[in-house]
């Protein structure tokens, strides 16, 4: 008979037989009970933290040594993996540096060979050597960055050897040229000024042009050969024409070619210049002298006629 108690013989325990239907019903009833108990524990923990806090602390204290013991080998394994990756990276870096060193040695030999050939060719051509240059390092003390002018005022003048027409550069490239000189200060006309005109050459195509400032941050590349293409990224250096700048000074790169006239981004960030180098390339003596100031407006000038009469002009 199902679901009854059987009295066992002497020496045996009590055996309770449960039918499969009751066992399934019991299992179905246990799950909701556990869910309800869990919800009650959550509610109680929210209602009163002091009830479960000692139990949580005790459980944490009991589990902490085991977690610490487990974390040590995991950390050691992670450290070994990091070291293995580091060794692989060092191996790759070493291989790259060896290749780069081989290339540099190759270029060093080529440079030494070209230098030797250059010396020999110079001796054959009787080339006039470049004169030694001198320079003065000056600090920018004023920046006239208005809408109609782009120039610097530096704290070096004729007492320091600064002269009108000398080139002004930084480690990045050309800044401009000296236009006014006092005994202790000088004014620098920037490449972006409206009055700046610099003969340049495009390194890639070797075409010549004029870099014209327009008081914006990107001067214009004008008077170039329309048939020769100019691409974004083309480097510009001074061409040496005009006798103001020597050839080869870095000026900037072409930043835009929209429209008919390209725009050039100077190498020097002119808004952040603090110190400049004023270089004497020995070319300032070829510049024309400043034009004498005109008579003041309103003044009367009476030129003499050949016959002695004067007329107000």
Image: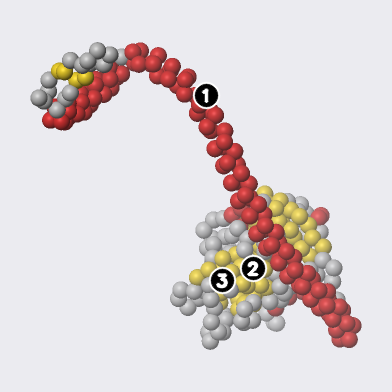
Is label 2 or label 3 in front?
A: 3
Name the residue that disc number 1 marks.
65
The quadrant in which residue 36 appears is top left
Q: Tell which of 47 and 20 is nearer to you.
A: 20
Q: Quadrant of the C terminus?
A: bottom right
Placement of 54 over or under 198, stated as above or below:
above
Name the residue that disc number 3 marks.
233
Indicate which disc, 3 or 1, sits on the residue closer to the N terminus.
Answer: 1
Q: Quadrant of the N terminus?
A: top left
Placement of 302 over or under 24, stated as above or below:
below
Question: For this view, does 278 lie left or right of residue 226?
Answer: right
Tell me how far mark 2 sits from mark 3, CA to CA: 12 Å
Tell me how far mark 1 sits from mark 2, CA to CA: 68 Å
Q: Secondary structure at mark 2?
A: strand
Q: Secondary structure at mark 3?
A: loop
Question: For this view, does 218 lie left or right of residue 302?
Answer: left
Indicate which disc, 2 or 3, sits on the residue closer to the N terminus.
Answer: 3
Placement of 305 over or under 63, stated as above or below:
below
Q: Residue shown at 54%/65% (left/top)?
A: 218
Query: Is residue 172 among the parts visible in the rendering?
Result: yes
The quadrant in which residue 39 appears is top left
């Amino acid at each position: 008979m199902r679901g009854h108690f059987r009295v066992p013989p002497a020496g045996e325990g009590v055996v309770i037989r449960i039918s499969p239907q009751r066992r399934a019903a019991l299992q179905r009833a246990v799950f909701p009970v556990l869910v309800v108990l869990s919800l009650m524990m959550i509610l109680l923990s929210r209602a009163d933290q002091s009830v479960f806090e000692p139990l949580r602390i005790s459980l944490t204290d009991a589990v902490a040594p085991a977690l610490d013991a487990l974390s040590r080998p995991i950390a050691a394994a992670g450290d070994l993996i990091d070291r293995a990756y580091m060794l692989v990276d060092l191996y790759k870096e070493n291989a790259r540096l060896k290749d780069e060193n081989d290339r540099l040695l190759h270029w060093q030999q080529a440079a030494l060979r070209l230098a030797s050939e250059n010396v020999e060719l110079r001796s054959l051509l009787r080339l006039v050597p470049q004169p030694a240059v001198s320079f003065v390092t000056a600090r920018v003390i004023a920046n006239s960055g208005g809408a109609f002018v782009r120039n610097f005022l530096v704290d070096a003048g004729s007492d320091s050897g600064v002269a009108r027409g000398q080139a002004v550069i930084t480690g990045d490239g050309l800044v401009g040229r000296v236009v006014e000189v006092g005994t202790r200060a000088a004014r620098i006309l920037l490449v972006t000024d409206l009055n700046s005109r610099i003969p340049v050459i495009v390194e890639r195509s070797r075409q010549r042009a004029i870099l014209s400032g327009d008081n914006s941050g990107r001067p214009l590349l004008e008077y170039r050969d329309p048939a020769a293409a100019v691409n974004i990224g083309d480097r510009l250096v001074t061409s040496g024409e005009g006798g103001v700048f020597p050839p080869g000074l870095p000026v900037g790169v072409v930043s835009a070619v929209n429209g008919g006239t390209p725009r050039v981004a100077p190498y020097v960030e002119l808004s952040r210049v603090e110190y400049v180098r004023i270089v004497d390339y020995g070319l300032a003596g070829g510049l024309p002298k400043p034009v004498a100031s005109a008579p003041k407006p309103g003044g009367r000038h009476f030129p003499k006629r050949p016959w002695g009469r004067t007329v107000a002009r």
